[in-house]
Image: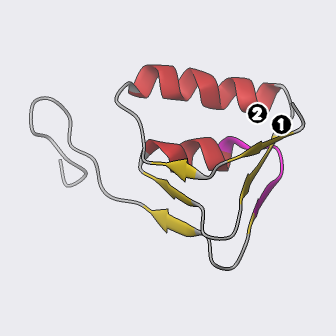
Amino acid sequence: IVTLELIDCPGTEDDRANLRLGQLIRDKGIATHVPADGWVASGAVDLFLAGARRSAEPSARFAVHSWEDITGRGPQD
């Protein structure tokens, strides 16, 4: 795999697995790309940022948000 194309990526339900996958993407030198009309949200943004080289078309969409852990603590804590 040279480039991972992120087309329809709503996020993750397993942050630990997502972090391991992101590290693997970076360790293997895999590029990430979001094509025209593609979108990445939440944990999928982490995967995009893990790319050794990152690119996105102008119409690509990104959704980021603050987090909250299982105890209800968020960024302000």
* Residue 26's disc number: 2
Answer above or below: position of 25 versus 40. Answer: above
12 is within the stretch colored magenta: no
Residue 7 rendering spot, x and y as whole percentages: 61, 52
Q: Residue at x 82, y 43 (%)?
A: 52
Answer above or below: position of 26 versus 58. Answer: above
Q: Residues within 10 Å of mark 2 (few under 14, many from 20)?
A: some
Colour approach in the figure: secondary structure
- Read off the residue under disc 1: 30
Q: Residues within 10 Å of mark 1 (few under 14, many from 20)?
A: some
Q: Which residues are magenta?
A: 50-55
Dot 2: element = helix
Answer above or below: position of 7 versus 61. Answer: above
Residue 56 rendering spot, x and y as whole percentages: 72, 66
Residue 32 rendering spot, x and y as whole percentages: 75, 48
The picture quadrant where one finds residue 38 is bottom right
Q: Residue at x 19, y 47 (%)?
A: 74
- CA separation, marks 1 and 2? 6 Å
Left or right: residue 8 compared with residue 48: left
Which of the image's four quarters has the N terminus?
top right
Amino acid residing under circle 2 = Arg
Looking at the rendered image, the disc whose residue lies closer to the viewer, 1 or 2, is 1
- Of residues 71 and 32, the one drawn nearer to the viewer in this rendering: 32
In contact (CB < 8 Å): disc 1 and disc 2? yes
